[in-house]
Image (tube, grey):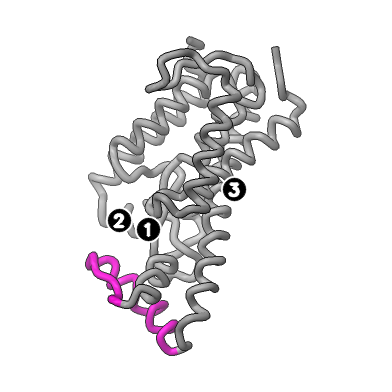
Amino acid sequence: MNRLTDVVKNLLIINVIAFVAQYMLKDIVDVSLGYSHFPLSQDFMPFQIVTSMFMHADISHLFFNMISLFFLGPTVEQSLGGKRFLILYILAGIVGTFAHITIDFVEYYRLAAQVDGGMLQTVLAEGGEILKRNQNYSSQVLGDLNLTINGRSLGASGAVYGAVIAFVTMFPKQKLMIFPIPIPIPAAILGVLMVGYGVVSGIGQLEPGIAHFAHLGGALTGFLMIHYWKMANLR
């Protein structure tokens, strides 16, 4: 295993500190920093696009993101250099968030076309407070519309997907042990499985609570940046 590199180490530390802060300062962090909100939500602030990348929903969410970064991130950083790796990580996270927002806008326009203007304004004005009380509209359309407008997302998954797919793009033949697969598999197979799972789950809406298109946006960024830097298929 490669040594823990500087940027990866600092990213791990920042994510853990941010996770602890979420629980120590829960009311402040949840509202202002902890989540990325839909741009039409009253709680939306532009800086959330970046700060939400360092927050996680629970300990398992943090663990799986950080374990991927811990094992594969150092090799990517050593290959690219610290500056390029940090650019890739941050850019993948931002693109992932924008990919998620884009899909939300598509869903917003689809649902908004099914309600009258007055009800739409009511959801925009009041829907967020209803969700904060762990309630929602009884109408399926209004409930889904409210979740689209006032739902929230967070996590480093888009950035981590970018780092992992960068590794896959540079070292597609590298054998990896991936739980629960009992034998080593080429990194290229891991990449296909991750992207395929994201596409199927995102299009099929198999897990509505997971921002699959944020993962895919991050993965695409990692792939494209490695090709842009002409670092694909290294020996």
Closer to us: mark 3 or mark 1?
3
Mark 2: amino acid: Ile
The label on residue 32 is 1
Q: CA distance from mark 2 to mark 1?
A: 6 Å
Question: Hey, which quadrant is residue 105 in on the image?
Answer: bottom right
Q: Earlier in the sequence, mark 3 or mark 2?
A: 2
Q: Residues within 10 Å of mark 3 (few under 14, many from 20)?
A: many
The part of the chain drawn in magenta is 118-138
Which is closer to the viewer, label 3 or label 2?
A: 3
Of callouts 3 and 1, which one flags the residue occurring earlier in the amino acid sequence?
A: 1
Whether residue 122 appears in magenta in the rendering, the answer is yes
User: Label for residue 95?
Assistant: 3
Residue 102, image x and y in percent? Answer: 57, 60
Mark 2 surroundings within 10 Å by alpha-carbon count, few (fewer than 14), some (14 through 19), many (20 or more): few
In the figure, 90 relative to 176: above or below?
Answer: below
Measured Cα–Cα span from mark 3 to mark 1 = 21 Å
The amino acid sitting under disc 1 is: Ser
Name the residue: 29% across, 67% down. 131
Cβ atoms at labels 3 and 2 below 8 Å apart: no
Front residue (pair 133, 194): 194
- Residue depicted at x 44% and y 56%: 36
233 is within the stretch colored magenta: no
Which residue matches tag 2? 28
The residue at the point 49 percent across, 25 percent down is 8
Q: Quadrant of the C terminus?
A: top right
- Dividing the picture into quadrants, the one containing residue 183 is top left
Q: Residue 116: x and y, percent?
A: 46, 88
Please name the amino acid that badge 3 sits on: Val
State yes or no: discs 3 and 1 in contact (Cβ < 8 Å): no
Mark 2 touching mark 1, by CB under 8 A? yes
Q: Residue 180 or 40: which is nearer the viewer?
A: 180
